[in-house]
Amino acid sequence: MANAKRGGYQVAKDPRTGIYLARWWQDGRGVKRSTGARDLAEAHERAKQMYAAAISGREQTDRRITGELAPVVAKWLASIEGVVSVGDWERCEMTFRVHVLPRIARIEQLTPASCEDFYRARLRQVARSTVKRERGALVRFVKWAARPGRDLINGFEVPTMPNKAKGTKKLEGRDETEITRDEMLAICDALPNRSRLGHPVKQLATLVAELGVRFETAQKLSVPEHWQPGSDELRITSEIDKEGVSRSHWLSPRAQRALGGAARGAGPIFGEFSYYKTLRAAARAVIGDERAQHLSLRDFRHACLSAIEAEHGIQAAAYVAGHKSTETAARRYVLPKQREARAALESLAAKDRTGHKPGTWAIEAESEFTIPCDFWQTRRDSNPRLLPPEGSALSS
């Protein structure tokens, strides 16, 4: 125990309850907290943790508002439900449920320092762009909850991310698997009509290959809300789209057969199931074990939209993908391809640019390389150079 005014904390028992209190000075004011313990050793341990959290900035000294953070987050999510897109709401909900609340459980623990701790922890796991989206959810929540008149949390300025932080890229081998449209359709043909558990994996993969729809969106398709048997039009509503973009797609005969084979009357067409094992087993016979190891329907979506962009431009690809901005579509689907890079290098290697074999460089015309006699008449100092004409005359 140390002198509270000189630094450190003090522990004293409350004579009314027998519970020990922790006291210290911070920012020119006295702070007093209950340890909640009647045992002196336990009280010292809790007081040490409370003091360390307070002076490090990971716990607010202004404790006008305290309590669990989860109920406040639930109120915020309820207030934005129906206002933002389904995909945006789901990202915000997952950010707090999976990443924020396990680290910051109480209102008084939500501080600039704890936010920076959150950034550092997440940057060791995911890319910078992912943490930027999660910080955006934090900023929106703090502004909403700390607004005057609402005052659900103690307001503060959410810190920015470190400028040079790069984060952690995806694990090796889990990058995008590049496939061509012919390979994609061959994989669809190799799939069984139903998986071993009776799921329409072939129909789902065919629809993604034809339209480039997200797997999460395809799971929510239903009859008759989005498609009616025999129709050549698929309606994607804002409620089932990640970006909240409603649009209609023309269905090719192949896509119509896929929907007709999966639909079983009114209700969900595909539903929720796992397709990875069935898809990759069929893909091994087409593209080999190594490329099929991490294949997913996201790769089908990328292959479909990349083919659309190459044939009909970025605007068509952006509409099919459901992107509001062509810049977003270009950033995701107009990417350097390993296959194209290899073809370019092989093309360069096949060209005979010089007309000479290695090691056979020769002077074709000696007259063009005649060395003047004055070349050797140089000054013998640290900077050898030709003598001026008058110098040469005098020396001779």
Image (spheres, helix red, strand yellow):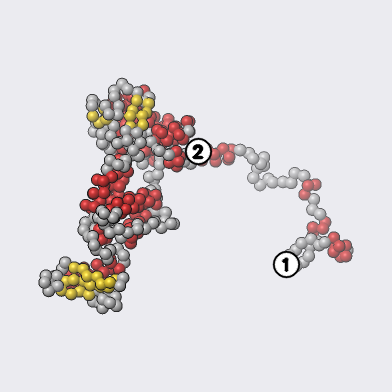
Residue 188: x and y in percent read 35, 30
> Which numbered disc flags the more N-terminal residue, 1 or 2?
2
Query: Within 10 angstroms of label 2, few (less than 14), some, or many (20 or more) residues?
Result: few
Indicate the secondary structure of the residue bearing disc 2.
helix
Is 319 placed above or below 162 here? above
Residue at the (21%, 68%) spot, across then down: 33
Q: In which quarter of the image is residue 279?
A: top left
Residue at the (30%, 27%) spot, across then down: 227
In the image: residue 134, left or right of residue 12 = right
Which residue is label 1 attached to? Answer: 382
Which corner quadrant holds the N terminus? bottom left
Which corner quadrant holds the C terminus? bottom right
Residue 247 shows in the view: yes
Q: Quadrant of residue 19?
A: bottom left
Is 31 placed above or below 179 here? below
What amino acid is found at the position of numbered circle 2 in the picture?
A: Glu
Query: Within 10 angstroms of label 1, few (less than 14), some, or many (20 or more) residues?
Result: few
Residue at the (37%, 26%) spot, across then down: 250
Residue in the foreground of this view, choosing between 350 and 40: 40
Mark 1 touching mark 2, by CB under 8 A? no
In the image: residue 310, left or right of residue 136 = right
Residue 156: x and y in percent read 32, 59
Residue at the (16%, 71%) spot, across then down: 20
Residue 297 shows in the view: no
Is 333 placed above or below 70 here? above
User: Distance of mark 1 from mark 2, alpha carbons?
Assistant: 52 Å
What amino acid is found at the position of numbered circle 1 in the picture?
A: Ser
In the image: residue 297, left or right of residue 335 = left
Residue 387: x and y in percent read 81, 62
Residue in the foreground of this view, choosing between 123 and 296: 123
Question: In the current view of this chain or complex, which residue is farthest to the front?
Answer: 149
Which residue is label 2 attached to? Answer: 340
